[in-house]
Structures are given as structure tokens and as C-alpha cells.
């Protein structure tokens, strides 16, 4: 990296931290710290909601997802706009009427204390682990670039977030996210423009899109009903609806964003803003990944995108020699592929299918070579990861973009990590202080005491996230890891809330038992079946309600 890239990167990060501290200095009570004095306008809420969901994983893994598997991942978000409408009509008014700090306060007023604690506990486990993943994602980049141990870069990222989140609470999170979101999308669009600019002179945006389509990267909709397929129209509409209802309606990291609104109307507008823009935003990021795929059809790509793993192989003379043989074969195969891709770009009508068939054969040979490279990496060090989709986009950025733009794109990734992690830490602290500490441990503390305790819990969860981030390398694709982790818990949590909102027949003991059964079943499906994880949300939610109804019926008939 050049000096200008370092200036752009660290200048952006330090300005964000300083801005967050400055704008929100002097929180004097828990109301200000946890709810931001209910002062946020709808556009700040909307951008904050989007920034909370758009972690560094979004900008690292999503382009790699499109590069490897195409743009079908967009279906994951198809249920989101409908979820925003449902939440705006039925859920937000309940939260505003009760004037809650956290979503889980509602559970005690509707059911009982143990259900509130269970809901808060499931959130703390799920979001506490997810916070570690969102810190890990940019940490691996900085570690690779600088050659520093991963633990150093993890601590740096975690510490930057902790500084302004501990300092300013909810208001600091929302105020900084507004600017982070603008930086993030501006940087990604800039990257997309440069991808097109770097393609051959005779390949413009139309030709690149056409090539991506011919090579299977623009298949947006899959109407097949397959429970083992993660991304179809039906998993997106149904499973995606349930995960969006749970994430935006019951996850404190999102609930805190819109509960800080000036009014119910502002909060509703913020949610609808997110519902309208989220799918287009994800489409743009996935499309950039598809364009990067086209770029690498005309330009040589590494046989394995994680250069740090390759460097370790090169330290072993015997494995280095084997790896270089694979690299040479891969480079020769690229020449053959590029010739066919050029023909495909010029082909029309009946000429297209034979070329696509030939390219499919070349792709299969490429995968064989990639598997050989992964085998060599594993033989060198069993602890090295052999999934490289998270490195595709950053490899393109580092190898092909000009000075200054590299720093901007790295700032995008770090800003995304900071925005989502700050929301998570703020939500974890809010839930811990309100639902656990203040409700069960110290009920009579002063406002100052709870303010200090909130800051200490924010620090505590930041340290927990940093600790868990050191283990996140054991996961495969990071964006899938976050979505899977959420789906394991979200269905149960959503079932509890839906029973509370709409099924007055179910009481506290019934929903508590239903929740325990549902969580056990979901964990079974996760560990012992190949079912697509989006269905976990539907199954968990349905079991909570079904078991709750049966339990309540049996109890009522015994009385």
C-alpha cells in the first residue's frame, strides 16, 4: 500500500471515531445513553438500520459469493420489505406505547420474568458471537496486508469501536453510522466503476453483463422448491420474511436504532426507508462481484485467493515446488479460457451454446487444479483455511485498483465493521443492563450508577467480541456464518414475540416450554441434517407457537 492509501484509510477511521465522540459527548443519564434522548430523524434511523446490517462481511463476502455462486443470494432479502410493513403497522406502536428500552421488556409485561430472561439470553448468545465475526472480517485483511499477527489487528479494530461506543452510547452509534453508510456505498460504487474501466476496450458494461449472464452469474431467481437449497424464491420470501421479522423486530441491535426516533412516524419512515433500499444495495454489491468475475476471465487470477496461505506454502521447499506446478498449469489453462471467453463475447445465436459447453469443461479443470492447491495448503499446515471466497474482492482491490482508491475501499470495509459492531455492543450492553442487571441484580441503583454500568458492560462485550474473533477463522464463508448463526436463534425468539403480539391464549409457562422445545429441534436440524438454514426460522417460530398452544390447551383442561 502507498502512503496516500494509509492516509485515506486511517484518516477516515480516526475522523469517524472523533466525530462519534464529539457529537455525543456528555451523556448524563441512562435515557440519553441507551435511547439517544429520542432525537433521531427518519433518515438517520434508516441509514443507521442499514449500516447495522451492512457489516464488513457484506463488503468482503458478498462480492465473493457472487463471484463463486452467482447473484442468487439476493433472494435472501426478498421477504424484507414485507417484514418492514408488518413491523411498522403492528410492532412499533406496541414498543412506543410501553416506552421500553429493550424489546425483551415487553416479554415480561406480556408473559413473565423467566420468558423475558430467556429471550434476552438467546439474544446475548447469538449477538455476542456475531459481534466477534464482524470484528474478525476486517481483521484478516489488515493482518494479511501488514503481516501482523491476527490478534493485533483484531484488538485494533475492536478498540476503535469500543472508544466511541462506550463514550456516546446509542446516539454515537446512530450519528456515526449515517456517515459510514455514505462512505460505504460511495466506495463500492467507485470500485464497480473501476472494474468496468479495467475490462478490455471492447468490453463495456453491456457486454460484461451479457458475459456474466452466459456464465451463470446473473441467475437471480430460483423457483425450485428444495428444502436443502439455501437460496430460492421460496426460502427468501418465507424464510427471509421470518428472519427479517425476528432481526428487525426482536433483535436489540436493530430495535435500539428505531426506538431512538423522535416519534412513531419517524421510526416507521426509517424502517420503510430500509425496506425500499436494502435489496437495491445488495444487488449493487452482488453485481460488482459478478463484474469482478468477468474481469478475471480476461486477466489472470491466483489459483487460490488468500495470499497469506500461499506465502506459508512457499516457505516449505517441497510444497512450494508442487504448488508452483499447479500455478503453471492454471496459468496455461487461463490462456485457453480467455480465448473462449473472447469468442463468447462476440458470439450470437447458435454459436453461444457450444462455447459455453467448452467453458464449462475448462471451469471443471480449473476446479480440479484449485482442489489440488487447497490440498497442498492443507498438507503444509492443517490450520490454514481452504475457503477463499472472502478474499476474492480484497485481492482484486489490492492488486488492480489505483493508489488512493485502495485506501478508500479499505476504509469502506473498516467503516462497515465499526458500524455494525458498534450497534451490537450498544445492544448487548442495553440488554444486559436493563433485562439482567437492573431487573434482577440491582433494582435500586442511581441513574449515574446505571450509566457507568452501561459503559462497563459495553466495554465487557467489546472484549468478549474481540476474544471470539480470534476463533472466527474456523468458519467458512463469513456472510453465511452470520446468517446461519442468526437463523439458529431467530426463529425461537420470533415465535415468542409473535405469540405475545397475536395469540393471547398462550401464557408464560406455555411459551417458555415451547421455546425450549423449538430451540432444541433447531439445534438438531443444524447439527444432524443438511436442511437450508433459512428454514430454521420458520420451523423454530412454528414450534414455539404449536407447542405453546398444545401446552396451554392441556393445562386449561386440567384445571
Image (cartoon, rainbow, N blue to C red):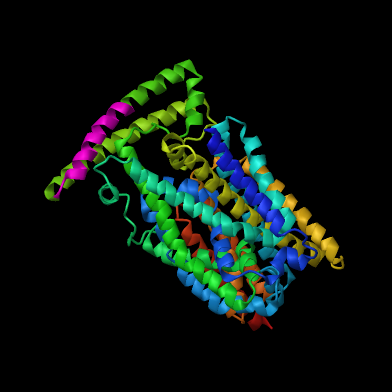
Tell me which secondary structure the magenta stretch mostly adopts. helix
Q: Quadrant of residue 420?
A: bottom right
Q: Where residue 296 sits in the image (x, y, percent)? A: 34, 38
Q: Where residue 176 sits in the image (x, y, percent)? A: 62, 57
Residue drawn at point x = 51 percent, y = 30 percent: 308
Tell me: 145 left or right of 94.
left
Judging depth in this view, the residue of 459 and 45 nearest the camera is: 45
Queried whether the magenta region covers residue 269, the answer comes back as no
Q: Where residue 491 sits in the image (x, y, percent)? A: 55, 64
Extreme-left residue of the structure: 350
Judging depth in this view, the residue of 430 and 378 nearest the camera is: 430
Q: Is residue 434 visible?
A: yes
Residue drawn at point x = 56 percent, y = 40 percent: 474
Report the magenta residues as a range: 330-348
Queried whether the magenta region covers residue 331, the answer comes back as yes
Tell me: 484 left or right of 17.
left
Q: Is residue 549 visible?
A: no
- Is 204 above or below relative to 250? above
Amino acid at each position: 500500500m502507498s502512503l496516500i492509501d494509509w492516509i485515506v484509510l486511517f484518516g477516515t477511521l480516526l475522523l469517524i471515531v472523533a466525530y462519534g465522540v464529539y457529537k455525543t459527548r456528555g451523556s448524563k443519564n441512562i435515557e440519553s445513553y441507551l435511547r439517544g434522548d429520542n432525537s433521531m430523524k427518519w433518515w438517520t434511523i434508516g441509514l443507521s438500520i442499514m449500516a447495522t446490517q451492512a457489516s464488513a462481511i457484506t463488503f468482503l463476502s458478498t462480492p465473493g459469493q457472487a463471484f463463486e455462486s452467482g447473484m442468487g443470494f439476493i433472494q435472501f432479502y426478498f421477504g424484507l420489505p414485507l417484514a418492514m410493513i408488518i413491523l411498522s403497522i403492528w410492532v412499533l406502536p406496541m414498543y412506543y406505547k410501553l416506552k421500553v428500552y429493550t424489546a425483551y421488556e415487553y416479554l415480561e409485561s406480556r408473559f413473565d420474568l423467566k420468558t423475558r430472561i430467556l429471550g434476552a439470553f438467546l439474544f446475548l448468545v447469538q449477538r455476542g458471537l456475531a459481534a466477534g465475526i464482524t470484528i474478525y472480517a476486517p481483521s484478516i485483511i489488515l493482518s494479511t496486508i501488514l503481516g501482523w499477527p491476527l490478534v493485533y489487528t483484531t484488538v485494533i479494530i475492536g478498540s476503535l469501536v469500543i472508544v466511541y461506543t462506550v463514550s456516546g452510547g446509542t446516539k454515537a452509534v446512530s450519528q456515526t453510522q449515517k456517515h459510514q453508510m455514505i462512505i460505504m456505498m460511495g466506495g463500492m460504487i467507485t470500485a464497480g466503476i473501476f472494474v468496468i474501466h479495467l475490462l478490455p476496450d471492447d468490453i463495456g458494461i453491456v457486454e460484461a453483463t451479457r458475459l456474466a449472464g452466459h456464465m451463470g452469474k446473473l441467475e437471480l431467481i430460483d423457483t425450485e422448491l428444495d428444502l436443502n437449497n439455501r437460496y430460492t424464491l421460496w426460502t427468501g420470501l418465507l424464510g427471509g420474511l421470518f428472519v427479517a421479522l425476528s432481526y428487525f423486530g426482536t433483535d436489540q441491535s436493530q430495535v435500539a436504532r428505531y426506538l431512538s426516533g423522535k416519534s412513531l412516524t419517524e421510526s416507521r419512515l426509517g424502517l420503510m426507508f430500509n425496506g425500499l433500499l436494502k435489496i437495491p444495495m445488495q444487488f449493487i454489491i452482488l453485481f460488482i462481484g459478478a463484474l469482478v468475475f468477468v474481469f478475471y476471465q480476461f486477466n489472470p487470477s491466483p489459483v487460490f485467493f488468500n495470499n497469506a496461505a500461499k506465502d506459508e506454502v512457499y516457505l516449505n521447499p517441497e510444497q512450494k515446488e508442487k504448488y508452483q506446478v499447479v500455478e503453471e498449469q492454471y496459468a496455461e489453462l487461463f490462456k485457453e479460457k480467455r480465448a473462449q471467453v473472447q469468442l463468447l463475447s462476440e458470439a450470437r445465436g447458435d454459436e453461444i451454446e457450444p462455447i459455453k459447453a467448452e467453458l464449462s469443461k475448462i471451469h471443471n479443470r480449473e476446479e480440479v487444479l484449485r482442489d489440488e492447491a487447497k490440498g497442498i495448503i492443507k498438507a503444509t499446515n492443517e490450520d490454514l483455511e481452504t475457503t477463499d471466497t472472502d478474499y476474492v474482492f480484497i485481492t482484486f482491490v489490492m492488486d488492480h485498483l489505483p493508489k488512493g482508491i485502495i485506501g478508500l475501499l479499505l476504509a469502506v470495509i473498516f467503516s462497515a465493521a465499526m458500524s455494525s459492531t458498534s450497534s451490537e455492543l450498544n445492544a448487548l450492553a442495553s440488554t444486559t443492563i436493563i433485562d439482567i442487571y437492573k431487573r434482577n441484580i440491582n433494582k435500586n441503583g442511581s441513574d449515574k450508577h446505571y450509566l457507568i454500568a452501561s459503559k462497563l458492560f459495553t466495554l465487557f462485550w467489546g472484549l468478549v467480541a474481540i476474544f471470539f474473533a480470534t476463533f472466527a477463522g474456523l468458519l467458512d464463508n463469513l456472510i453465511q456464518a452470520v446468517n446461519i448463526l442468526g437463523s439458529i436463534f431467530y426463529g425461537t425468539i420470533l415465535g415468542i414475540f409473535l405469540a405475545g403480539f397475536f395469540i393471547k391464549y398462550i401464557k408464560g409457562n406455555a411459551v417458555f416450554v415451547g421455546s425450549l422445545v423449538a430451540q432444541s429441534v433447531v439445534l438438531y436440524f443444524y447439527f444432524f441434517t443438511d436442511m437450508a438454514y433459512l428454514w430454521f426460522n420458520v420451523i423454530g417460530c412454528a414450534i414455539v407457537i404449536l407447542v405453546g398452544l398444545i401446552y396451554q390447551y392441556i393445562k386449561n383442561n386440567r384445571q
